[in-house]
Image (spheres, rainbow, N blue to C red):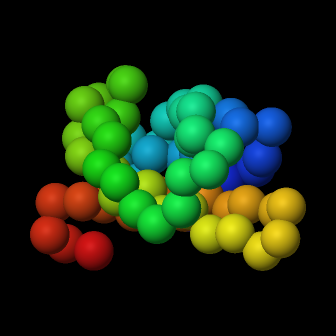
Amino acid sequence: MSAERMEDRFLVTCPYCGEEVEIYVEPDLKGSFVQDCEVCCSPWRVRVSRDGDDRWVDVVRADGSE
């Protein structure tokens, strides 16, 4: 699921429970990392893409089913 950018904060939708959660992504971060949902505690794989000054965040399940 793609996210809407708010500076270094992104609004993402949990691929498990469907809740929208705001996450912070360090300004210089690229690649991916694992983070748990604040609502249901399930693990996400957060992928950060960059094109110049624009960044995108994609959140998928990180339980091996992705």
* The N terminus, quarter of image: bottom right
The image shows residue 63, relative to residue 17, as above or below, that is below
- The image quarter in which residue 36 lies: top left
Q: Residue at x 33, y 41 (%)?
A: 35
Give left or right: position of 61 versus 64: right
Q: Can residue 11 be seen?
A: no
Q: Residue at x 54, y 46 (%)?
A: 13
Q: Residue furthest right?
A: 53
Residue 24 position in % (x across, y down): 58, 33
Q: How many marks?
A: 0
Residue 12 position in % (x across, y down): 59, 45
Residue 3 position in % (x across, y down): 67, 53
Q: Can residue 47 be seen?
A: yes
Q: Residue furthest top?
A: 39
Residue 10 position in % (x across, y down): 67, 41
Q: Residue at x 55, y 52 (%)?
A: 29
The image shows residue 62, relative to residue 17, as above or below, that is below
Q: Residue at x 30, y 50 (%)?
A: 34
The image shows residue 22, relative to residue 4, as above or below, that is above
Residue in the foreground of this view, choosing between 3 and 33: 33
Q: Residue furthest front?
A: 28
Residue in the foreground of this view, choosing between 15 and 8: 8
Give left or right: position of 46 versus 26: left
Give left or right: position of 30 versus 53: left
- The image quarter in which residue 17 lies: top left
